[in-house]
Amino acid sequence: MTAPALAPGGQAAVAVRPRRYWAGAAAVLLAAAFWGTTGTARALGPQVAPPAVGAAKLLVGSAALLLVAFLGQGWRPVARLLTQASLRGWGLLAALATAIYQATFFSAVARTGVVLGTVVAIGTSPVFNGLLAHWLSAERLTPRWMAATAMAVIGAVILLYPGKADSIDALGIALALAAGLTYGLYTNAAKRLLTRGVGIVPLLAGTLGVGAILLLPTLLAGSTPALFKPAGLIMIGWLGLATTAVAYLLYVRGLQSLPAATVGTLGLAEPLTATLLGLLLLSERPTPRAAFGAALVLAGLLILTVQRYRPPEPSR
């Protein structure tokens, strides 16, 4: 299967089929909404070292996906992803990107603080995503995408960073940038595997499963008794099943219909969800500045998703 052709304006050819486009956008936005629950789940759950939480949720999520893959088609499609020469490189790249993202993101947050680390990682990921899509898949970065992404990134920075940082650590910033880069690498590697005929469930089961294995020493080395208590099991169950297995299924399903650059920018719906949950469940009150940032993110997402339908030109 070849990569989808790009239509005028930089969107994939599937953009001329509005139902499929909207279904893909809705899947990505819903995935981002699930990811946005991570902070609330962490706040309501037991205090556990962040790297151990990342490893545990990836392990639970990948185990669930492997079970779904086995019940659906057996192990052969997953084994094909990891053994076939034309797929193995992209599959291993996606798995490595997943593991590095978890390690670098949580390490960045530990060094710089939650606010600054999250701002740098989430704020730069759509830019890395778009540049990688342009470099690896020749996706056109249109003025529309650039304007929408710039607006959403600026809004996310304002939303997530309404005050001063507790500390600025050069290594922590570098780790956050690495997290943004590896998020883009995973998206683009997954897109390449989809265009080569790999199914969504085998793709996720294989890449997240190998990523979980790579992170297993982090979980085993940490002191994590709280994870095995009821509150810890509930937290990891939600993070592993909802924010990993289900969210990645939705995210990669969106990649089937949308360019990788567009999918990366739509992921900025995550901080909107986190803000709303903080307001409803944690009694947080966003400042006017944060509300303005949320409005900018929403405006950027609307610019990117609300598109005029262009019927295909008649063949000559």
Image (cartoon, rainbow, N blue to C red):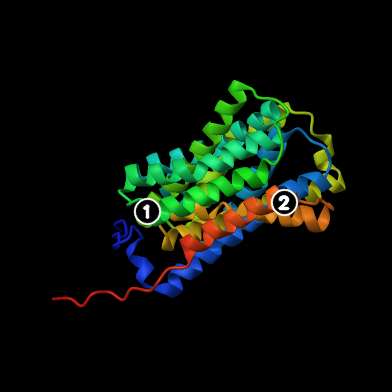
- Residue at image position (69%, 53%) is 291
* Quadrant (top left/top right/bottom left/bottom right) for the C terminus: bottom left
Of the pair 295 and 196, the residue shown nearer to us: 295
* Quadrant (top left/top right/bottom left/bottom right) for the N terminus: bottom left
| Residue 136 visible here | yes
Give the percent coordinates (x, y) of residue 130: 41, 46
The residue type indicated by label 2 comes to Pro
Considering every residue shown, the one lying at the far top of the view is 170
Give the percent coordinates (x, y) of residue 176: 58, 32
Which class describes the residues within 10 Å of circle 2: few (<14), some (14-19), or many (20+)? few
Q: Which residue is mark 1?
A: 143
- The picture quadrant where one finds residue 49 is top right
Which class describes the residues within 10 Å of circle 1: few (<14), some (14-19), or many (20+)? few
Give the percent coordinates (x, y) of residue 66: 58, 52
Give the percent coordinates (x, y) of residue 280: 80, 58
Q: Which residue is mark 2?
A: 288
The residue type indicated by label 1 comes to Pro
- The picture quadrant where one finds residue 214 is top right
- Residue at image position (65%, 55%) is 272
Secondary structure, mark 2, is: helix
